[in-house]
Image (cartoon, rainbow, N blue to C red):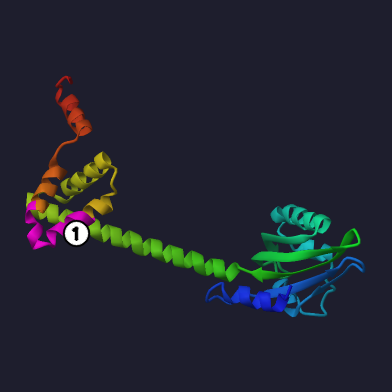
């Protein structure tokens, strides 16, 4: 398991954010745990400030994740093989990090020999992804709103109705057909922007004006007309 190369490759694939990634090696015979400089930094230390131990490693796990991490690690130690867990740690400065820990438990002569692996800090990457998703959601919402406003304007111009009445036509059609309002609005805009589709535009507007069964029933009840 070529850890430094693996860590560099994994970290570089995580996006533009800077990801701290470090390695560890646990000698099960001597009980000695070794950290790379990056792993010290991830836990808020510099090499020489503390002696890494398994107990210290677990002390830095988020309390809500500690038991799960322990179970995953112990299962690997007992059976050998690879393990991986996504969890949180609290560094020496009480900052929370979201990390991915992966490694391999090496066994021999019926028992655990060593555990080696790496830890990658995903905090900045997840923050970047969250910001990007939020930005895309806002842009999408603004685009949807703009599309609906354009469609309302088209209906207002053709039918000589107000803004609320135009939106009501779009919303009612969406409810009747189970098609999103934004999709209906986009279809209306496309037809309005195509001079050769004037007949289809008239037909589409007529379809929007056609009262649905539920809408007609509601109106009849309101007017005191019995149904059926």
Closest to the observer: 69 or 27? 27
Mark 1: give few (<14), some (14-19) or many (20+) Cα within 10 Å: some
| Residue 145 quadrant | bottom left
Quadrant housing residue 88: bottom right
Q: Is residue 197 magenta?
A: yes
Give coordinates of residue 162: x percent, y percent.
13, 49
Main SS, magenta region, reads helix
Q: Identify the residue shown where x is 11% and y is 52%.
A: 200
Q: Which residues are magenta?
A: 186-199
From the top left corner, tell me how far across and down residue 139 is, in percent: 35, 64
Q: Nearer the viewer, residue 122 or 13?
A: 13
Look at the image and tell me in which quarter the N terminus lies: bottom right
Residue 36 within the segment the image draws in magenta: no
**Side (left or right) of 190 relative to 196:** right
Q: Is residue 170 above or below residue 214?
A: below
- Does residue 210 appear to the left or right of 31 in the view shown? left
Please state which of residues 196 and 52 is positioned toward the viewer in this rendering. 196
Which quadrant of the figure contains the C terminus?
A: top left
Give the residue drawn at x 55%, y 75%: 17
**Badge 1 is on which residue?**
150
């Amino acid at each position: 398991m070529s850890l430094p190369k693996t860590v560099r490759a994994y970290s570089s694939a995580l996006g533009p954010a800077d990801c701290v990634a470090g390695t560890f090696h646990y000698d099960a015979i001597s009980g000695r745990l070794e950290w790379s400089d990056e792993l010290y930094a991830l836990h808020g230390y510099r090499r020489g400030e503390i002696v890494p131990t398994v107990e210290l490693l677990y002390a830095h796990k988020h309390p809500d994740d500690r038991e799960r991490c322990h179970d995953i690690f112990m299962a690997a130690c007992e059976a050998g093989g690879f393990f991986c867990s996504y969890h949180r740690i609290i560094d020496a400065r009480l900052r929370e990090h979201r990390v991915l820990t992966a490694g391999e438990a090496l066994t021999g002569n019926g028992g655990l020999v060593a555990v080696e692996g790496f830890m990658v800090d995903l905090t900045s990457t997840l923050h970047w992804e969250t910001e990007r998703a939020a930005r895309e959601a806002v842009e999408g919402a603004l685009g949807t709103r703009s599309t609906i406003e354009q469609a309302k304007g088209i209906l207002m111009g053709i039918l000589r109705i107000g803004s609320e009445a135009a939106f009501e036509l779009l919303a009612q059609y969406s409810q009747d057909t189970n098609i999103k309002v934004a999709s209906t609005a986009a279809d209306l805009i496309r037809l309005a922007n195509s001079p050769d589709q004037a007949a289809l535009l008239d037909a589409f507007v007529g379809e929007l004006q056609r009262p649905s069964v539920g809408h007609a029933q509601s109106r009849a009840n309101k007017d005191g007309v019995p149904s059926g």
